[in-house]
Image: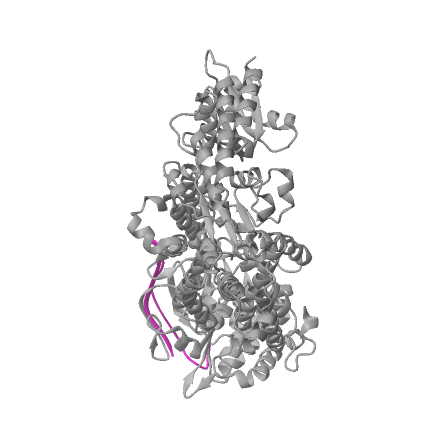
Amino acid sequence: MTVLTQDAPQILGDRQSNARLLMGALVVMLCITSMASLAVGASGTSLWQSLLDLAMGRDLSLRDRVVLWDIRAPRTFMGILVGAALAMSGAVMQGLFRNPLADPGIVGVSSGAGLGAIMAIVLGGLLPAAITNQIGFYLVPLAAFFGGWASTMLLYRVSTRKGRTSVATMLLAGIALGALTGALSGILVYIADDAQLRDLTFWGMGSLAGATWAKLFAAAPLMFLSMAVAPFLARSLNGLALGEAAASHIGIPVQRMKNIAILTVAGATGAAVAVSGGIGFVGIVVPHLLRLMVGPDHRYLLINSGLLGAALLLMADVVSRTIIAPAELPIGIVTAVLGGPFFLWILLRQRGILDL
Amino acid sequence: MMNAQDITVAYGSREILHGVSFSAKPGQVTAIVGPNGSGKTTLLRALTGDLPYTGQAVLNGIDIATAKPWDLAAMRGVLPQATPLAFPFTVAEVVRLGLQRGLEAQETSLISRALARVDLGEFAGRLYQELSGGEQQRVQLARVLAQVWHPVSEDQPHWLFLDEPVSSLDIGHQLQIMQIARDYADQGGGVIAVMHDLNLTAMFADCVALVADGHILEQDSPNTVFRNDLLSHAYKCNLRVNTPPATGAYLLPHAASMAAE
Amino acid sequence: MIRASLFCAALAAAPALADPHPDASRIVSIGGAVTEIVVALGEQDRLVARDTTSNHPASIRELPDVGYVRRLSPEGILSVDPDLLIAEEGAGPPEAVALLNEAAVPMETIPSGYSRDAVGAKIRAVAEVLGVPDRGEALASEVLADIDAATAGVAQWDQPPRILFVLSLQGGRVMAAGSNTSAQGIIDMVGAQNALTGIEGYKLVTDEAVALSNADVILMMDRGAGPGAQADELFSHPAIMTTPAAQSRRLVRIDGMKLLGFSVRTGEAVRELAAKLALAEG
């Protein structure tokens, strides 16, 4: 790892210039993958031909317009947002819990959101038709978001005493809450019929396939806001690596910063899980990989995680919709198949070097 | 000026400190000594604002209980007993964590100077997690020094709070670290250190607070506090203080007490 | 319209009356039952793609697969440049359907159902959509006659066998068919009895409910796995082990689409199920 720092012009051990170079590379990578996501798909619609046609003032065929504008474009933006939100939330969570294996799943955001979605799928039919007609297929995403938000708030209340949030209590309570939401989900699965079960299975595997402009506009503000706030936490998260007391000693308002971090994660992850289901590994693998490359300085880690998470999720999505075209594989399967072994490889490679 | 009046700290229903009063002056090294479990670290943690307490603690005229963390950070640094790091920061990055905002332009030179001060100039590029415990402790001291580099700014002294700063160090580095603390005080800064080693305390401290069972038995110069009867009472064993005029006080455990234990 | 009114009674359950598309030549067929009807009507040449559940006859598998019936990929469907989508009820997700609608791909939904009459209604609806109502009428008569002959041929049971339909064994839990399911439909047709009562739809059922069912026969879909292994796993399940079916190792397996599709092969399914039940009973 120190090899990377050899050409740093300043003091040895300062990896800032590497992190900045990497940021530039990741921006380029994200642009390329975004283009690929717009250009690649089961149908023969060509992005370049369509752009050329538009430039020449020719109208696109209805099919090409739908494929590019209503299918690929919202899906690409959704991929960018969800990938960035998951990876950034992972990085914030790991910084907050001072544990490189922490994940938004730990604070109950994911399990709460999952419970919300399952409730919507299984019990949605019990709602008055007037309501279901109004919100239609946004019912599941909305329920997922509120589930994630509610469980985070509950957990936070449980672990906060006299204005101090105990991270250890939160971890333990998160496990308890995970078990509880798991059990409630189990009950719901028990009473679900087979069609609902199939919906649950597919939701659980995660997918960007349901991306529409309307969903994007519903989920984007929350993800944007959360991600815009996250970089302001960078200095505090760096300090928190020393421990809560030491962080406070160097001037970090630890309690306020923890509040903001938890809200940020709940917002970004809740919204992401709501629109895309359970997409695993992005939140753990991306920040971990970046820490190995340019170190754990959150001033770069958070933004780089967002960029790399977005690019990787787009790549996984391109794979998911082309590998068995015209059908598609849920993206959660692609990220798990690619991410799982990769993560194991990282762990094996650094075993004994870094203390997890 | 550090002034604490009637400080009481309780963990749940168990009271650790019973209304102690303590003070420290800039330009001095003030040591807090006492047996294990006496409450000396608890006192330090109350004074750094880490523990809720009743009573009043004031540093440079600012009430610790209500001060904002950044205001406190601007005038005092704290060195904990040990600082495990969650992530693979390099030594230089750890030291940079201590820098106050607005110093980005000089950060390279400040980091180098702080590391040179603790004799770790060559370690800047190493990973903190790969260092030995003693090296990590010196890196942390460099981090704290980077935070409160100037002992006095605008007539407000800066302070170093050290919690058993030399416990994990070899004797050479113990002397080195204590000398850094001594120099900091000599330049006008304040140093408050929880100490285990009474001999090092006698060598470097200007003032000693002896804590036992949640009370400060006495706070005065080492030569005054380090008396056979008082120390033997506090540590519940027989201790003998030797005071040759050339070197100052040093302590030996009394042979009888060793046999008794 | 006049002819359409003839089918009104049969289509009462349908969400909307199907419009005929006699000129559609690039059709995507979604749902195994629908696809089998399209093929039986002799209109296979008009198909350009199918869904995952459309696996019969074998020749249909050469067409591109646009995904599972409830998880269709809109761009995947658009990629085969369809001029008509003919789908069984429940095809989705709704987002995909909305996008296809946006892309002006006409979509016709065929009502589902688990009875003799539902089969007729499906055939007529598909034929109507394809613009071949006469052939649909002929096929419907033929298929219904076949079903009637099959049900008439089922031996009268002294004691109707109690059948437990096991959809899957998920992590040791039994997912079985209650009332208002396709499995219940076919069990009714052979004059047998669903061993599981008081449950609606396909459910993960408790071990005790399985034990209490007193099933004489276990019915499963044939997935082409080795018969021995599946039976061993099934009958070593602690709940199923206690049933009479396990004690005499009575397991009947029939191709899932044939058994549960309620399409052109339903008569065949009734005969096969009745024969296998008789064999198992004997």
Query: Is residue B245 visible from the viewing direction of this image?
Result: no
Q: Main secondary structure of the magenta part?
A: strand
**Rendered view: C43 above or below B76:** above
Given the current orientation, which residue lies at the most extreme bottom position?
B154
Given the current orientation, which residue lies at the most extreme top position?
C158
- The image position of residue C14, as x and y in percent, is 39, 42
- The image position of residue B253, as x and y in percent, is 54, 60
Query: Is residue B28 visible from the viewing direction of this image?
Result: yes
Figure quadrant of residue A49 = bottom right
- The image position of residue B114, as x and y in percent, is 58, 79
Please name the colour scheme applied to the rendered image.
Answer: one colour
- The image position of residue B74, as x and y in percent, is 43, 79
Figure quadrant of residue B10 = bottom left
* Residue B71 or residue A334, whichever sits in front: A334
The residue at the point 68 percent across, 72 percent down is A4
Q: Which quadrant holds the C terminus of chain C?
A: top right
In this figure, what is the number of numbered marks? Answer: 0
Q: Which quadrant holds the N terminus of chain C?
A: top left
Q: Is residue C132 magenta?
A: no
The reply, left or right, for residue C91 in relation to residue C226 is left
**Rendered view: A68 above or below C278:** below
* Residue C272 or residue A123, whichever sits in front: C272
Q: In this picture, which residue range is highlighted in magenta?
A: B1-30
Q: Is residue B28 magenta?
A: yes
* Residue C199 or residue C160, whichever sits in front: C160
* Residue B150 or residue A332, whichever sits in front: A332
